[in-house]
Image: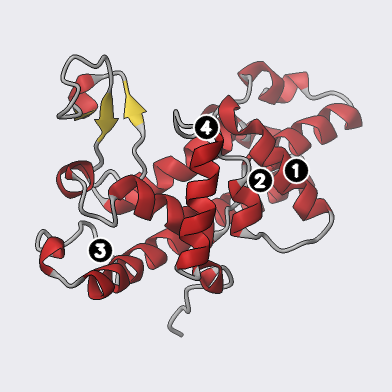
Amino acid sequence: MFFSQLPNDLKSYEIKKRKKLFISIMLPLLIRGNDIVNYERKKLKKIFENSEFKFLKNFCVKYKVVIDKCMANNIHTRKDVETLKDHLLTKINTFPLSMMLAQAAIESGWGLSRFAQRGNAMFGQWTWNEKEGIKPKDNLTANFAVRSFKNIQDSVNSYILNLNTHRAYEKLRKYRKLMVEQKKIFEGKKFAKYLDRYAEIGYDYVLKVILMIESNNFEDFDNLKLKLKS
């Protein structure tokens, strides 16, 4: 079951039950978000296997790669192909569920924040278009708002895309690429070390995410997958 919104009576639950409910709502959506990226990754590999470069443009637009580099008439040599493939695959990949779940809990206050309840904003993403978000109550003169979403899944997908494209998380993506090359499993606490630019508090935010993972045993969820009905 996929929830589109958080229950508006979440606050009435006892803390332990509230956390359990929050986790049960978020995990399927996070897994689905990763599945969407995995599907795109497989599709991209097929494009390169079959040299169907005319289909690259949409990937380049979504993942913020210079369009000229993706145009079929600009891909002439094997080196061009491998460079572009490497660049795109570095950006199109998944993240550990434990890290994502920890960030969702922190950024939404376990689903109790005004932004989460009113705008399905689970990850505190900013927007400079006030019509797309909710202004912070304690800073109404701020030139930003917290971006709102139609449903929680949209918030999850936007968050994953943000980590996969924003220059602030380039080191995170490079670390992930290294883990892929070494065929190592993705560990939330290790990935979290590269989130120092996610919040204004810098490395203190990294420690906050790691503590959230450890204190709630979130890494137990890292190998979860959605089971499809036959």
Between label 3 and label 1, give the one nearer the viewer. 3
Tally of numbered tags: 4
State the CA–CA distance, disc 4 to disc 2.
34 Å
SS type, badge 3: loop
| Three-letter code for the amino acid on which mark 3 is drawn | Phe
| Three-letter code for the amino acid on which mark 2 is drawn | Leu
Between label 4 and label 2, give the one nearer the viewer. 4
Label 3 or label 2, whichever comes before in sequence order: 3
Residue 200 rendering spot, x and y as whole percentages: 44, 28
Q: Which residue is mark 3?
A: 3
From the viewer's perspective, is residue 127 above or below residue 21?
above
* Residue at x 18%, y 23% (from the top left corner): 131
Tag on residue 44? 2
Q: Which residue is mark 1?
A: 48
- Cβ atoms at labels 3 and 1 below 8 Å apart: no
Label 3 or label 1, whichever comes before in sequence order: 3
Between label 3 and label 2, give the one nearer the viewer. 3
Q: What's the colour scheme? A: secondary structure
* Residue at x 70%, y 50% (from the top left corner): 46
> In screen coordinates, is 78 left or right of 121?
right
Q: Which residue is mark 4?
A: 202
| Three-letter code for the amino acid on which mark 1 is drawn | Phe
State the CA–CA distance, disc 3 to disc 2.
29 Å
| Three-letter code for the amino acid on which mark 4 is drawn | Gly
SS type, badge 2: helix
Work out whether residue 224 or residue 55 is closer to the camera in this orientation and state it: 224
Label 4 or label 3, whichever comes before in sequence order: 3
State the CA–CA distance, disc 3 to disc 1.
36 Å
> In screen coordinates, is 46 left or right of 5?
right
